[in-house]
Amino acid sequence: MTTIAPLPVTPPTPAEAAAHFRASLAFHTDVSDVAAALAADGGPGFVLLDSRSTESWDQGHIPGALHLPTAQIPALAPRLLDPAVPVVTYCWGPACNGATRAALALAERGYRVREMLGGFEYWVREGFAHETADGAERRAADPLTAPVGGVCGC
């Protein structure tokens, strides 16, 4: 019989884990959920905010997103955003914390905000349409990030 080595860190109790994951779902959303909300009748019920630079925006962004770089949030958010409407932030991808910094800047100013996990990278990798400075584009979904048939079942 094989003995399994103990974990280097003791796992949380089930109640602690449930509280953590419940909170995570309140603070985060994913690319597929955002795409479904954007396509829903009646609109998404939130503003999708791209917090990257103008050069990054021009390279590609999600149709319908508002471009507001993080550094400009203090000056421009009051003119561009309604505090009664939730905001979903995104940046490049999982290796970038720009969406987190933008979400923090918004939350500190009284906005209800969530972060879209995966960012623009996973939006494109999952095969959703995007816009560039040259017009609309759409790439085939990467089978490592998007399920065959478009429904992951999770």
Image: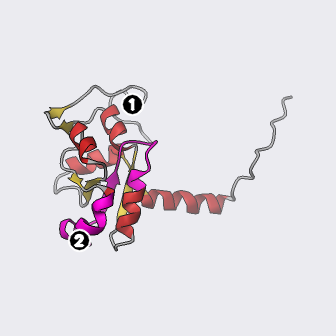
> For the residue labelled by badge 1, is the local secondary structure a helix, a strand or a loop?
loop
Which residue is at a point 86% across and 28% down the rendered structure image?
1
Residue 90 coordinates in the image, percent (x, y): 34, 50
Residue 77 coordinates in the image, percent (x, y): 25, 66
Residue 111 vs 2, above or below: the answer is below
The Cα–Cα distance between marks 2 and 1, rounded to whole angstroms, is 39 Å
The residue lying toward the viewer, choosing from 76 and 99, is 76
Q: Which residues are magenta?
A: 71-100
Question: What residue sits right under mark 2 in the picture?
Answer: 78
Residue 94 in the figure: left or right of residue 48: right
Colouring rule applied to residues = secondary structure
The residue lying toward the viewer, choosing from 143 and 110, is 110
Query: Residue 18's image quarter?
Result: bottom right
Residue 86 vs 123, above or below: the answer is below
Tell me the amino acid under the disc marked 1: Pro
Camera-near label (2 vs 1) is: 2
Which residue is at a point 25% across and 68% down the rendered structure image?
75
Q: Residue furthest left?
A: 135
Q: Is residue 75 magenta?
A: yes
The residue lying toward the viewer, choosing from 30 and 151, is 30
Question: What residue sits right under mark 1 in the picture?
Answer: 147
Q: Residues within 10 Å of mark 2 (few under 14, many from 20)?
A: few
Q: Residues within 10 Å of mark 1 (few under 14, many from 20)?
A: few
Q: Pick the quarter of the image with the C terminus.
A: top left
Residue 32 in the figure: left or right of residue 46: right
Query: Residue 127's image quarter?
Result: top left
Which residue is at a point 46% across and 57% down the rendered structure image?
25
Which residue is at a point 41% across and 64% down the rendered structure image?
104
Tell me the amino acid under the disc marked 2: Pro
Residue 126 coordinates in the image, percent (x, y): 33, 34
Question: Mark 2 near mark 1, Cβ–Cβ under 8 Å?
Answer: no
> For the residue labelled by badge 2, is the local secondary structure a helix, a strand or a loop?
helix
